[in-house]
Each structure stands twice: as C-alpha cells, then as structure tokens.
Amino acid sequence: MPANRSTYLRRGMAALAALPLLTLAACGYGSESKNDDTTKVAAGARKIDGLDSVKIGYFGNLTHATALVGREQGLFQKELGATKADYATFNAGPSEIEALNSGSIDIGWIGPSPAINGYTKSDGKSLRIIGGSASGGVKLVVNPKKITSLKDVEGKKIATPQLGNTQDVAFLNWAAQQGWKVDAQSGKGDVTVVRSDNKVTPDAFRAGSVDGAWVPEPTASKLVAEGGKVLLDESALWPDKKFVITNIIVRQAFLEEHPKAVEAVLRASVEANKWINANPDRAKAAANKQLGIDSGKELPADVLDPAWKSIQFTDDPLASTLGTEAAHAVKAGLLDKPDLKGIYDLTILNKVLEAAGESPVDAAGLGTS
C-alpha cells in the first residue's frame, strides 16, 4: 500500500473510531441493554455450548431492524435458551469492529464497508459474514430551493455520514459517474462532501450548512420532515433495486468454537425477517419500540412510515453487491484492491434456511469454500 494511502486510512479509521468512544457506556464499546431479556427464558431451558451469554451488537437505526425486532420480540433469547442474550448498541462501524476484535461482542449487525475494512485490516482473520439482514434504505435528500435536478448537485455541499463509510463511498462513486471530480480525502471538488454524523446532519440541513445529504434511514426521512426532497433513491442504481446495507458478522474464533450458538442466533434472525415481512405494521412498531428503549425516544410517524417503506429485509447477504461496493471504494482511492475470498461463511445460514423450507443463498465466489 502506498505510504500516503496507508497514512490516510489509518487517520480516517482512527478518527472514526475515536468519536463514538467518547459517548459510549462503561463496557468500553457499546451502550448496555436497558431491558432484561432473561425474563423470557423458558422454564427448563438449557445453555447452548455451555455459554453463559452471547454478546450481540447492532446500531440503533431502522436498517438494523432485524436485530431490533429480534430483541424486542425475545426471539434471540428464545433460541439461546438459558444462555443469556446480552446486547450492545453502536453509533459507528469502527467501534463495533473494535468490540468484535476485543471479544466485547460475539456477533453483530453492521454495514458492508466496516465489514470489508475489518476483514482486510486483519488479513482475513477477524470476522466472517454469516448472513444478510437488509437492503436499501439510502437516499439523496436535498433542499428543493437550491437543487431541483440531479445536475444541480454540482457545486453544492452534500453530507455523508463518515469519511469512507458505505454511503460516503456510494456518493463518491455516483459523483464520479456524473463526470465530477472530488478529492476523496478532503471532500473538495466539483461537489463538496461534508462528513457529518447522522445525528447532527438534520441540524446542519436546517441551518443551511449543507444543501443535501446521501444518508440511510431514518436520517433521510428526518430531512424530508425538515422540508427536504428525495432526489434519488440509491436502490434505483442497483440491479433488481437490491444492495446490501446490513450484514451479520461473527468473530471467527466464536464461529469455530460455538457453532450451535451461532446457529441459534441465525435461526432467530431468519424468524425475525419472516415475521417482519409477514407483519410489516406490527414489526415497524416493534422496531420503533426498541429504538425508544435504546435511545430514549421513538421516531414520529412522519419519519418512521416513509423510512420503513424503503427498506427490504432479507436473509440473503447479496454478496455480489458487496464486491461491487468494494470496487467502488477502490475506484475512489479509499481502499487498495482487497482479497475478499473467504469473507463469507454461509454454511450455517443455509442449514437454517433449508430447515425452514427456504432456498439457499450464495456467496458470489467470496465464500470459505
């Protein structure tokens, strides 16, 4: 790796990792559970693999609704029996990867870019992607007084959540397709990219500090509630309008040592997605309830409803789109061409899907075998 790119990546990842750690709870990485799921352990249940607990991480946003619903409905605890389902919530991918590497969590819901970064930085030794969770839920929302068409984005200030994160890469790639030049590191060019935490982006949008944002839900719908307009749904740029936004990852050591526990979590995830797709309104309410427990505030209907409609929940990790997203990061100069062979191990997921009468999913040549 060239020295300047190596330095850039170290600085970028360090900056991303440091910010959320300032506000996380005493466990060092993620916020602790506020509701006690041990009350849902069935009488006579046994521990899985002799484990006292399985530590599960996820983000407090709707693209992680599989985890939110699985937790709120007690599905993880049900499948784990007397092994306690412990939870931690995160605000950013780097802190979740750090927690996974340290053993503070065993399994986590996470976006494709941090999964790729975590895998490549460890030379393929830290994690495996073991399942899918969600597709879509990313939009370009703009101030309609300043931007009325896609070509009007040129010369404007557009927010993305983090330098080098999944949406940042997607926007840089889209901008390049328009023929615009942007320096990935500084964000300066024919379009100015402003890296802004999703929590503060609505304030920046309201104040006029940014003219739009390429962001995931529910931030996109929060901007619409502030008077923004959806100029582009990222799903329109992908074949079949599907692309991975959330994966399930596991520590490789945990996968090797406790496959029964991993299988239990995946059964709960598959059950959660099945329930979400069969009962969208009830699932939406359950996800919002858990968001309220985790953050102290539920989403209002004018944000929740449109955000929920734009996300598809799927067990398929959509592996081919992960490879494409990695190629976009390489093209933008954010990543050297990675070797992703082995990043997926879908063996247990396909076992669970077969037992449920569902079709197997494919690793698109990036599996362990």
Image: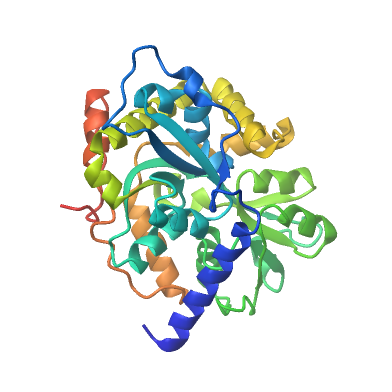
Q: Residue at x 34, y 59 (%)?
A: 323
Figure label count:
0
Q: Nearer the viewer, residue 43 or 186?
A: 43
Q: Residue furthest right?
A: 207
Q: Nearer the viewer, residue 91 or 272?
A: 91
Q: Residue 203 occupies which quadrant of the picture? A: bottom right
Q: Position of residue 288 (x, y in %)?
A: 63, 31
Q: Residue at x 72, y 49 (%)?
A: 229
Quadrant, the N terminus? bottom left
Q: Position of residue 49 (x, y in %)?
A: 26, 32
Left or right: residue 87 versus residue 213 is: left
- In the rendered view, how is the structure colored? rainbow
Residue 139 in view = yes
Q: Position of residue 349 (x, y in %)?
A: 27, 36
Q: Residue at x 48, y 53 (%)?
A: 96
Residue 360 in view = no
Question: Relative to residue 185, is residue 2 depicted above or below?
Answer: below
Q: Position of residue 84 (x, y in %)?
A: 42, 29
Left or right: residue 272 versus residue 305 is: left
Question: Relative to residue 353, is residue 362 depicted above or below?
Answer: below
Q: Residue furthest left?
A: 369
Q: Nearer the viewer, residue 330 or 255?
A: 255
Question: Relative to residue 50, is residue 99 depicted above or below?
Answer: below
Q: Nearer the viewer, residue 226 or 2?
A: 2
Left or right: residue 90 versus residue 257 is: right
Q: Residue furthest top?
A: 43
Q: Residue at x 48, y 82 (%)?
A: 7
Q: Residue furthest bottom?
A: 3
